[in-house]
Image (cartoon, grey):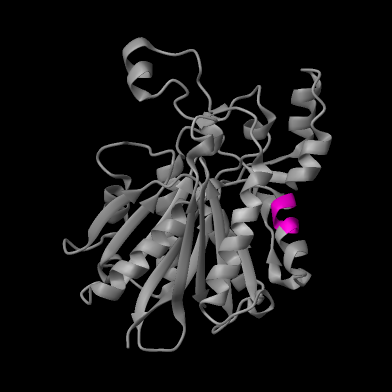
Amino acid sequence: MSRIHIAAVDIYHPENAVGNEFYLDHFDRRDQDIRRFMEHMGRESRYVIDNDEENGLTMGIEAAKKVLVKAGLQGSDIDMIVFSTQVPETTFPVNALYIHAAIGAGSHAMVLDSNANCAGMVVAVDHASRYMLTSPEIRRALIVGSDYNTLVSDPESAVTYANYGDAAAAVILERSEAEGGFIDSIYHTDPVNRDFIRYPAEGLAKTVKHGSDAKGILWLPFEAHAAMPPTFEMFEKLLGRNGLTPQDIGSYCLSQFSLENVLKIQRQYELRDEQMVYVGDRFGYTGTSSPFIALHEAVETGRVKRGDPVLFWSIGSGFQLVAMLFRY
């Protein structure tokens, strides 16, 4: 029986690291004290693009090249390329086409872009895994997640300007007869907040036709904690139908949007500190790539070993919630 494994994971981030002091001063000058907010979100530093040569696509290309080297593969070994982003460098052609060219993939490889907002890379890995299970000719897939979120951050909004960081992650999925690999996934969708986080703020049609003074993300206040009860229900259903308990999970590679959300999940299930992977203090919130930057951290530090069950979870605007189980 074929199974879909994560063969390798790697990341890329810009060199420029910006500490909290810059943002504290920025908002102090606007008579806004964001210190408690920074503590709640768990931020200390983040990587930010500060030049005209880098963008979300170039970060994705670099992450793709690094993961191929780590896996000992060439671009011609890849049968499927999925680029997950909510800040595409082009709407057409697809960004994945540029990744295809950069790694020298073969003409047989299918390419597509995927956007499920911040939940996007977990969704892309889930969908690619399921596609591979039903398509024997797809032996290896390259999934890349990259958001240039600071490009569209609003300097007047702490939740975007002081919260976001720029980084990309890439994983290679590989068909294998070995035990483990992709197990299952679960979704919860509630569009109640669909108009609270928007970019472009006025929608694409109005922005193109009439222009807009709103250059950054529209982010209106909403009850973020409302996502936690359905998250707990999802976890219990997903784990239960696969014969696992929360304590069985080796590592929780969760959205890095908020440290407080990670701690809520830990408290809910009385999880051990070593089960929780948090990198948002160093990377900021990188959007679609954040659960896989957490996976990279867990693998590189030895917290995740082959055969360990890993639970991924992310939340997209709206709410879009997704949880996914892999046995690494």
Q: Quadrant of residue 184?
A: bottom left
Is residue 315 within the magenta segment? no
Using the image as rendered, state which of residue 48 and residue 314 is in the foreground: 314
Outermost residue, top direction? 210
Q: Residue at x 46, y 66 (%)?
A: 185
| 66 to the left or right of 285 | left
Please provide percent x and percent y for residue 77: 28, 71
Q: Say if 80 sits above or below 176 in the image.
A: above
Please provide percent x and percent y for residue 162: 68, 34
Q: Quadrant of residue 31?
A: top right
Q: Quadrant of residue 306?
A: bottom right
Q: Say if 13 sits above or below 325 in the image.
A: above
- Quarter of the image where the N terminus is located: bottom left
Query: Does residue 143 show up?
Result: yes
**Which region of the structure is painted magenta?**
260-264
Please provide percent x and percent y for residue 188: 50, 54
